């Protein structure tokens, strides 16, 4: 069986890369004593996979992975077993046993929702002031780093929604992005574009991914765990 | 975490070095502890997290109900300059507490070239670098580890050194300091109380004088609390000593990313250049039953997928085959692999290959140390060419095709013949490979020979010897290189002599070197163990400004009756034994492994310490 696992990768760990996180999860699974299904072969290992890699520096509030297990593990047992052996900054939030034939989570990943928080200061206020105008643009070209180097790319098609809110300490932007044939957009690049467009200097901020999105048959985007 | 620190993290390489949050990292609230201890490792996070000693002491201190211990490691250069630029102090990984707010900070001294990091870390953490400038509210600064056996070059910076096995002594020291804190005992008195403990050396309570020729005249206590000689701490119940079975499991891959099971401590071989072999006497082993239990517990608590055996010479463990077999069985179900020491593969490799498929095929390493039998006899390295050939032939017919051989140049009595012998040995190794029938061996033979420059170390029979000067080192390296040129599948690596020279100075140095260290650090030396950071020019400048001569420290043969800067430290080994060994070395006479019979190194005089000689 496969378990779909919603977990939080906390603030402390936002600079831990994808492979390092993968190793940490594999070790937690071994600690948990849960009946894991190992791959066959010379070098047996735990074949877990993440639905969508999180860029370094971003906090993941509802990250997703799938874990192959021997049959018969209950969702509650999995969640409790893992939370008992994970450090406080990694938490399992929800689990769902997947039906046979449920597609690989990775193949369902269609987009992400982010929250960008920043305290108010001269620079960040300037960015906030230009937010609406930036969102209204139909195209915005930026140098985007891909495997084949830095390429100019229109980043606007990646963005399907964005709202700005005033908070106690400053501002909060909710951003929704989708993957396209050209790949996906890092929220940090989007923020950099906003700054360049509004001529704002650097300002402290923190980015959270609040959901990994999948498409329902009708085409609407929802958090993957709801599909 | 603050936005400030966060912004820094976004700008440095490998920010995961500074964020902590590992599984099993301590989460005791620091504010509620009676006494707080910052365990400082003067090298990068990845090196620190590979170090077994740190895991042991971290675990022990946190098991004390009244204490909390947190980790601090040396930031990399990018982070160093960010911290300085933004006036952010160096903080602990667990609770992000600045170094200056701890009651005790303790450094482990594994390598002389980390000394500037000790100064840099204190300074960044807001702790006065000079012991004499610390006030009542500043932390007590401790240091331990192998380099503490010659503490003098650090005497201006460290309040108290812990000499020998740290397990018990760190608890005693913490207890005493905790009591002092409660009673409000002033700093000077706290240090005097520490000086009364076994294995503790408080350098501020001693005074040094020199002869006209620059050699040491005396180094004696000036306070009744301080003993004339400080006897090292020795852990006697190794079987039941604390083992860190749930150490922090780092995210960022450390140098050794696995469980390190300490199967024994000490070594009986008596290699004459090896400081660890002398300092960690006597040999103490854990039972197979105990080790299997510890391995299981470690896997359960860490989830590591690999376990390796840790000791100075694991293949000498009395029941190594039984241990390998039983560990493999015990760990099979969890798919945990065991990596075995490669030395003396002949003893059990056949056996083990049937036990496990996971013996690493990639790297096979041996340390003949010297190119000829004569020189190996001088250094008492008990490896014969026949041993090596047999072992290699065995390994080559079992699927290995790459081997690394480690050597030293500049060993006492070395001649050109010994140097050429390094290339000859590489040829012999290749011969062993080609003696295996073509269909039984794996294609693509690779022999890598590395030679480091010999550094004489205190408490070894070679403590009186000189190191080659840089000119000689270069000539010798050239000679060996020439003899490697015609060899197709063998490659020769060697190290720059500058680092080894400074290392020798600080290994063998006296109190006056503390000023050189201080100056070199002020000039910008740090992370000297990293070749790309080492600034030989600044070190030379520091020596010059302090009016001290490198050659006096590194390239001078010492008289056997000279008072050495570490003679007031008692490692349990007799100076007479070291002299005897030195003289035998000069005659190329070997000394037996003391498992075969006691050689009277001095430990036999201490009650209940060395089992082998009773
Ligand atoms: S006392 Fe004898 S047996 Fe023990 S370590 Fe020394 S030489 Fe070896």
Image (spheres, coloured by chain):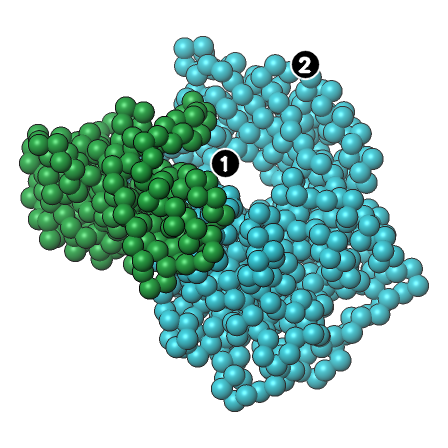
Which label number is shown at residue B238?
none
Report the residue at 65% width, 69% height from top: B128
Q: Are marks 1 and 2 in contact (CB under 8 Å)?
A: no
Q: Which chain is green?
A: A
Pointer 1 indicates a residue of which chain? B
Between B82 and B206, the residue placed more toward the observer is: B82
Answer left or right for A40 relative to B64: left
Q: Residues within 10 Å of mark 2 (few under 14, many from 20)?
A: few
Label 1 element class: loop
| Residue B320 visible within the image | no
Work out whether residue A65 or residue B144 is closer to the camera in this orientation and state it: A65
Q: Is residue A88 left or right of residue B271?
A: left
**Please, what secondary structure does the residue beneath circle 2 have?**
loop
According to the picture, the residue beneath numbered tag 2 turns out to be: B486
Q: How many marks?
A: 2
The image position of residue B466, as x and y in percent, is 79, 46
Q: Which residue is mark 1?
A: B343
């Amino acid at each position: 069986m496969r378990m779909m696992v919603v977990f939080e990768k906390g603030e402390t760990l936002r600079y831990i890369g994808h492979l390092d996180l993968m190793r940490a999860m594999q070790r937690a699974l071994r600690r948990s004593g849960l009946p894991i299904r190992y791959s066959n072969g010379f070098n047996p290992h735990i074949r877990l996979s993440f639905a969508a890699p999180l860029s370094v520096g971003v906090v993941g509030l509802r990250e997703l992975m799938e874990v192959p297990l021997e049959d018969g593990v209950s969702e509650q047992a999995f969640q409790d077993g893992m939370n008992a052996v994970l450090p406080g900054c990694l938490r399992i939030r929800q689990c769902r046993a997947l039906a046979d034939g449920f597609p690989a989570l990775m193949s369902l990943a269609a987009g992400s929702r982010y929250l960008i928080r920043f305290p108010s200061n001269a620079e960040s206020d300037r960015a906030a002031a230009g937010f609406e105008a930036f969102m209204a643009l139909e195209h915005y070209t930026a140098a985007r780093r891909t495997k084949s180097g830095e390429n100019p790319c229109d980043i606007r098609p990646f963005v399907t929604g964005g709202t700005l809110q005033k908070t106690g300490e400053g501002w909060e932007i909710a951003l929704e992005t989708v993957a396209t044939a050209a790949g996906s957009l890092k929220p940090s690049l989007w923020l950099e574009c906003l700054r360049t467009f509004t001529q704002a200097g650097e300002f402290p901020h923190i980015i959270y991914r609040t959901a990994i999105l999948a498409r329902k048959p009708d085409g609407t985007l929802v958090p993957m765990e709801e599909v | 975490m603050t936005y400030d620190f966060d912004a820094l993290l976004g700008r440095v390489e490998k920010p995961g070095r500074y964020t902590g949050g590992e599984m099993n990292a301590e989460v005791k609230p620091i504010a509620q502890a009676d006494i707080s201890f910052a365990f400082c490792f003067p090298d990068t996070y990845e090196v620190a997290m590979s170090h077994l000693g740190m895991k042991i002491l971290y675990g022990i201190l946190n098991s004390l109900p009244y204490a909390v211990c947190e980790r601090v490691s040396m930031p990399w250069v990018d982070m160093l300059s960010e911290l300085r630029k933004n006036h952010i102090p160096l903080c602990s990984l667990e609770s992000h507490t600045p170094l200056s707010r701890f009651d005790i900070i303790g450094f482990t001294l594994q390598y002389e070239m980390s000394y500037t990091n000790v100064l840099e870390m204190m300074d960044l953490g807001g702790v006065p670098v000079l012991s004499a400038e610390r006030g009542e509210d500043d932390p007590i600064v401790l240091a331990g580890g192998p380099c503490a056996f010659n503490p003098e070059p650090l005497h201006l910076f460290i309040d108290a050194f812990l000499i020998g096995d740290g397990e018990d002594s760190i608890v005693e020291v913490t207890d005493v300091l905790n009591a002092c804190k409660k009673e409000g005992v002033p700093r000077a008195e706290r240090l005097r109380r520490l000086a009364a403990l076994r294995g503790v050396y408080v350098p501020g309570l001693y005074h040094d004088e020199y002869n006209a020729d620059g050699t040491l005249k005396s180094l004696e206590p000036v306070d009744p609390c301080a003993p004339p000689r400080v006897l090292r701490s020795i852990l006697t119940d190794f079987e039941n000593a604390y083992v860190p079975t749930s150490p922090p499991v780092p995210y960022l891959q450390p140098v050794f990313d696995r469980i390190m099971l300490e199967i024994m401590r000490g070594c009986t071989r008596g290699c004459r250049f090896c400081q660890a072999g002398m300092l960690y006497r006597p040999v103490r082993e854990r039972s197979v039953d105990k080790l299997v239990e510890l391995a299981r517990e470690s896997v359960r608590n860490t989830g590591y997928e690999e376990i390796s055996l840790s000791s100075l010479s694991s293949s000498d463990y009395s029941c190594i085959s039984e241990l390998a077999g039983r560990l493999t069985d015990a760990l099979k179900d969890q798919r945990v692999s065991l990596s075995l020491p490669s030395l003396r593969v002949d003893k059990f490799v056949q056996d083990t290959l049937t036990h496990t498929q996971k013996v690493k095929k990639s790297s096979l390493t041996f340390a003949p140390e010297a190119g000829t039998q004569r020189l190996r006899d001088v250094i008492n390295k008990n490896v014969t060419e026949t041993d090596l050939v047999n072992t290699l032939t065995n390994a080559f017919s079992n699927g290995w095709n790459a081997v690394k051989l480690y050597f030293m140049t500049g060993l006492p009595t070395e001649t050109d013949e010994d140097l050429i012998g390094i290339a000859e040995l590489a040829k012999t190794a290749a011969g062993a490979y080609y003696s295996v029938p073509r269909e039984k061996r794996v294609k693509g033979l690779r022999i890598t020979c590395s030679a480091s420059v010999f550094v004489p170390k205190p408490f070894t029979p070679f403590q009186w010897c000189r190191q080659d000067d840089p000119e000689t080192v270069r000539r010798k390296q050239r000679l060996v290189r020439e003899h490697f040129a015609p060899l197709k599948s063998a490659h020769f690596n060697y190290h720059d002599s500058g680092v080894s020279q400074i290392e020798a100075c600080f290994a063998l140095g006296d109190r006056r070197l503390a000023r050189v260290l201080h100056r070199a650090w002020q000039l910008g030396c740090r992370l000297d163990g990293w070749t790309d950071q080492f600034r030989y020019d600044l070190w030379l400048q520091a020596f010059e400004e302090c009016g001290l001569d490198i050659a006096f420290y590194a390239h001078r043969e010492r008289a056997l009756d000279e008072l050495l800067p570490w003679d007031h430290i008692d490692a349990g080994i007799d100076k007479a034994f070291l002299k005897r060994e030195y003289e035998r070395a000069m005659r190329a006479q070997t000394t037996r492994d003391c498992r075969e019979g006691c050689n009277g190194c001095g430990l036999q005089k201490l009650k209940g310490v060395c089992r082998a000689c009773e």
